[in-house]
Image (cartoon, helix red, strand yellow):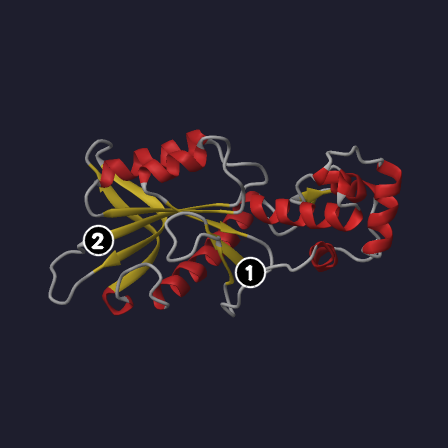
Amino acid sequence: MNTVKKGDDFEEKAYKLISKLLNNHQLGVVPAHCEVFKKKGYYSAKREKYIIFDLSIEVWPPGAKNYTFLYLIECKDYSGSVSVDRIESFDSKIRQIGDHNIKAVFITTSRLQEGGRALCEKMGVMLIRCGRNMTYDIILHRVGGKRPYRRNIETEEPYSFKTLKDVLLSEWTKAVDIKLLEAVSRLGSLYKISGTSVPVLSRKDIESLAIRILDNYSRNILRNSEVISIEPFIKYLSDAFDL
């Protein structure tokens, strides 16, 4: 798939998501007073021309001659992490349109590089990460709860995993290669194994899984700081999770 087609497909997915959030009253505005646009331009006095944004939402109260609030939305489907420079560039474009009645929304498939999330927090950006299987997490400025608001875009059902086995079997067949075993044994991230993307788990989710696995294997490991013998541990993972 070429990059233009990939970008267009993701923007369509993001449009569907934003429309869903709007109609479910998750953006803090009344849907009946809003209109969602694709690739609309907003005038920049600094550039003396219009800046085109991937998506936008204009809020028009009854009888208003102009919109009173504006969501400006950037959609990025990256194979790698999102750089801080990309966030700063998005912020710069928004500031050329205005500061007082604009809400920035950044939708991406990737993690942010170090400092990127902190920058989004300082800027007040609403950060949304899209996963596979039509799922999404509202990472920043979500409504209620401390955990990511992870939902399926179409069904709005909570999207979560109960066990490590659920994670593995959700994305791969039973034939799991040694790279996966090595990653699990190192208690590393399950984000990408052998080039295959899997749903992103939070740091707390990964830690919870790791503690559960280690305690089931041997309670002395965490209590007494015992060293793990790697081969028996791999054998345990293989037997316990049918790998």
Q: Specify few, some or many for label 1: CA neighbours under 10 Å numbering under 14, 14-19, or 20 or more.
A: some
With 26 as the anchor, is 42 left or right in this view? left
Q: Where residue 9 sits in the image (x, y, percent)? A: 52, 54
| Residues at discs 1 and 2 in contact (Cβ within 8 Å) | no
Check the image and report above or below for 87 versus 242: above
Label 2 sits on a secondary structure element that is strand
In this view of the protein, which residue sits in the foreground, 44 or 59? 59
With 48 as the anchor, is 183 left or right in this view? right
Q: Specify few, some or many for label 2: CA neighbours under 10 Å numbering under 14, 14-19, or 20 or more.
A: some
**Residue 202 in view, yes or no:** no
Quadrant of the rendered image containing residue 122: top left
Tally the numbered discs: 2
Quadrant of the rendered image containing residue 57: bottom left
User: What residue is disc 1 on?
Assistant: 134
Q: CA distance from mark 1 to mark 2?
A: 28 Å
Q: Amino acid at mark 2?
A: Phe
Q: Where residue 176 sits in the image (x, y, percent)? A: 82, 50
Quadrant of the rendered image containing residue 60: bottom left
Q: Could you say which disc has been placed on residue 241 in the image?
A: none
**Residue 12 in view, yes or no:** yes
Q: Amino acid at mark 1?
A: Met
Q: Could you say which disc has been placed on residue 69 in the image?
A: 2
